[in-house]
Amino acid sequence: MSTAFVTGGSGFIGGRLIDRLVREGWRVRALARSDASAAKVSERGAEAVPGDLHDAAAMRAGADGCEYAFHAAAHLGEWGTREEFERDNVGGTRNALEGSRAAGVRRFVHVGTEAALLAGDPLVNVNEDAPLRPDSKALYPATKAMAEQAVRDANGDGFETVVVRPRLVWGPGDTTIVPGLRATIEKKRFSWIGGGNHLTSTTHVDNTVEGLVLGATRGRPGGVYFVTDGEPVLFRDFISSLLRANGIEPPDRNTPAPVARLAAGGMEAIWRTFRLKGSPPVTRLVYWLSAQECTIDISRARAELGYEPVITREQGLAALRSEAAAA
């Protein structure tokens, strides 16, 4: 029986990963920072281990006896302090690595992101050879780049690391994209930037989990792999379909891209200078993620992992529509 330790198991990707592993007969332990988190991972069939990302000793205890560790926990968001992002994304990843190595874990699989490459330019048919951008002016990309570098550097001396990078993860149980869009629409702050008619890659959560499992079982030590739903799609078409599948009608409002780009930089400066509460209406990261092409080459995952999407974009959207109708 394969054994695994999972961080972020009460979240979107980590929870779906636990479902898959338990269904396939793995014994799973999951870090749980609260009683609510412990209840969530237990309901999915994992053994809850009390602790959080700031406690390497707790992670060592959780990973004890496990062959694999999956690190899905991260500090998400478009806005916050450098201290918060570095503590959770960089420090938390280093603690997970330290705890896993000390526990005798053989392979550590890190949930990466294309955002680790973002620093202001579009990503066009990008592959794993593109440089990480720890110098990014947006904190999430910068700290995810630092975290991934720490994972890569840890590979060796009997401890294997693999990075799996999905792009724009969506599907049932989503806690970020649709809830965020819904809130923006309700506040009447939603707008397409430049029409939204650029190409984007996407990754259904089940395809993300497929990549993680293959990364664990077939990946090359030290390997980095992009996984997506396959062919890219127009950003506006996909987001509109995703919103409608969740019973939300997308607004028609549009903001010219140059205006949004200037506004993002200006608003960030104002918010930081005057230490305003909340987040700016538009940030650099929001602009990069929603207004620029992001297309991914997954040929390495196909060649080295045998990766193919297990669910199509159309199937995933149809399932969401059925779920919404039943609810």
Image: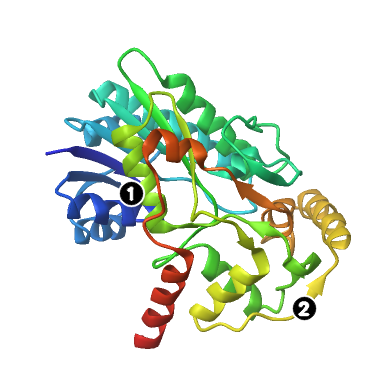
Do tag 2 and tag 1 residues touch (Cβ < 8 Å)? no
Query: In which image quadrant can residue 133 be found?
Result: top right
Q: Position of residue 2 (x, y in %)?
A: 17, 38
In the rendered structure, which amino acid carries the disc numbered 2? Arg
Query: In the rendered view, does 26 fall on the left or right side of 112?
Result: left
> Are there few (<14), some (14-19), or many (20+) residues within 10 Å of tag 2?
few
Q: Nearer the viewer, residue 29 or 110?
A: 110
Instruction: Name the residue at the top extreme.
Output: 157
Q: Position of residue 234 (x, y in %)?
A: 66, 64
Q: Which mark is residue 33?
A: 1
Rendered residue at 73%/47% (across/down): 122
User: Is 9 placed above or below 150 here?
Assistant: below
Indicate the secondary structure of the residue bearing disc 1: loop
Query: In the rendered view, does 203 fall on the left or right side of 30?
Result: right
Indicate the secondary structure of the residue bearing disc 2: loop
Q: Position of residue 59 (x, y in %)?
A: 30, 34
Rendered residue at 76%/49% (across/down): 272
Rendered residue at 46%/27% (across/down): 151
Q: On the rendered image, what quadrant is the C terminus found in?
A: bottom left
Residue under label 2, please give it.
253
Label 2 to label 1, Cα distance in Å?
Answer: 40 Å
Viewer-side label of 2, 1 = 2
Query: In the rendered view, does 22 fall on the left or right side of 166?
Result: left
User: Is 168 placed above or below 68 here?
Assistant: below
**Can see residue 52?**
no
User: Is 10 placed above or below 222 here?
Assistant: below
Q: Nearer the viewer, residue 318 or 79?
A: 318
